[in-house]
Image (cartoon, rainbow, N blue to C red):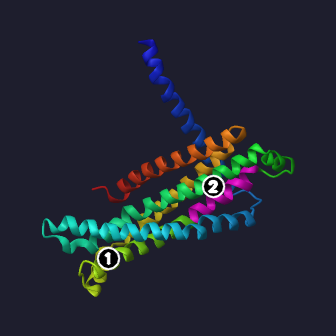
Amino acid sequence: MRRLLGGIGAPVLAILAAIGRVTIFAGQTLRHVARPPFYGREFMTALAQIGWLSLPVVGLTALFTGGALALQIYAGGSRFDAAAVVPQIVAIGMVRELGPVLVGLMIAARVTSSIAAEIATMKVTEQIDALVTLSTHPMKYLTVPRVLAGLITVPFLVGVGDIIGIFGGYQVAVRSLGFNSATYLQNTVDFLEPLDIVSSLVKGAAFGGIATLMGCYSGMSSGRGAQGVGQATKSSVEAAAVLILAANFILTGVFFSV
């Protein structure tokens, strides 16, 4: 019995310890945000890498998802004579859920892994130690600009993804399913509410913060050597993806609980 309880308790304690370390790291990041100096060049570079360079993958993902969603809703709705709800369901599905979640997961796959690998490599090659010897705080130089860039740019990416996803559904519905163009657009505009858009952008900010924070945390806490870099990259993406899905569930309950 003692061995059984020990086998159950050890993973639980490890998970709680990991949550504690991430929480402390997040608190330290917030504390350093308001303290000078602020590295504007690193911040602008992070904006470009997280925002601008992520547009192609976000746009393509949203476009095909919106088109596939329209096809699925039409096929399912046809069984119950409810095919006319395609524009409404595509709009609410993309804006409330699919848009933010897909963008968040794409950012986790592309940005989180990149940040973790970059910072872990700097740690392995002792570049972080060099920053300390130059009186530069590693967290202010590496973590704060990336987390701020994630908080700012990912909501814009989510907004772009929502629009492109709705456009993908519109193209499929009008060109392949026989919907009237003006009616489809009018139904989309009439069905969406301000709360839907606000929730989408708030989710984007939360997911951007999670993705960049986990990339920085995994990179800073990586082990030595190539194996340590690889493990940090893998664990960062896994943790970011799980936390993004958990945060999506929580935020959905906050915004749309009955």
Residue drawn at the location 46% of the way across and 14% of the way down: 3
Tag in front: 2 or 1: 1
Q: Is residue 127 above or below residue 74?
A: above
How would you classify the magenta stretch by its main secondary structure?
Answer: helix
For residue 73, the mark is none
Specify the amino acid type for callout 2: Ser
Q: Residue furthest bottom?
A: 182
What residue is disc 1 on?
172
Q: CA distance from mark 2 to mark 1?
A: 34 Å
Q: Is residue 151 magenta?
A: yes
Specify the amino acid type for callout 1: Val
Q: Can you give x and y, in whole percent of width and height, for residue 241 in the image?
A: 49, 50
Q: Is residue 104 magenta?
A: no
Around disc 2, counting alpha carbons within 10 Å, would you say few (fewer than 14), some (14 to 19), or many (20 or more)?
Answer: many
Q: Give SS at disc 1.
A: helix
Q: Looking at the image, tell me whether mark 2 or mark 1 is earlier in sequence order.
A: 2
What residue is disc 2 on?
114
Q: Is residue 117 left or right of residue 19?
A: right
Does residue 195 appear anywhere in the picture?
A: no
Q: Can you give x and y, in whole percent of width and height, for residue 80 in the image?
A: 13, 66
Q: Which contiguous range is marked in magenta?
A: 138-152
Q: Is residue 223 left or right of residue 162?
A: right
Does residue 76 appear anywhere in the picture?
A: yes
Q: Nearer the viewer, residue 237 or 197?
A: 237
Residue drawn at the location 47% of the way across and 21% of the way down: 7
Image quadrant assignment for residue 78: bottom left
Quadrant of image for the N terminus? top left
Around disc 1, counting alpha carbons within 10 Å, would you say few (fewer than 14), some (14 to 19), or many (20 or more)?
Answer: some
Q: Can you give x and y, in whole percent of width and height, for residue 30 in the image?
A: 63, 52
Image quadrant assignment for residue 227: top right
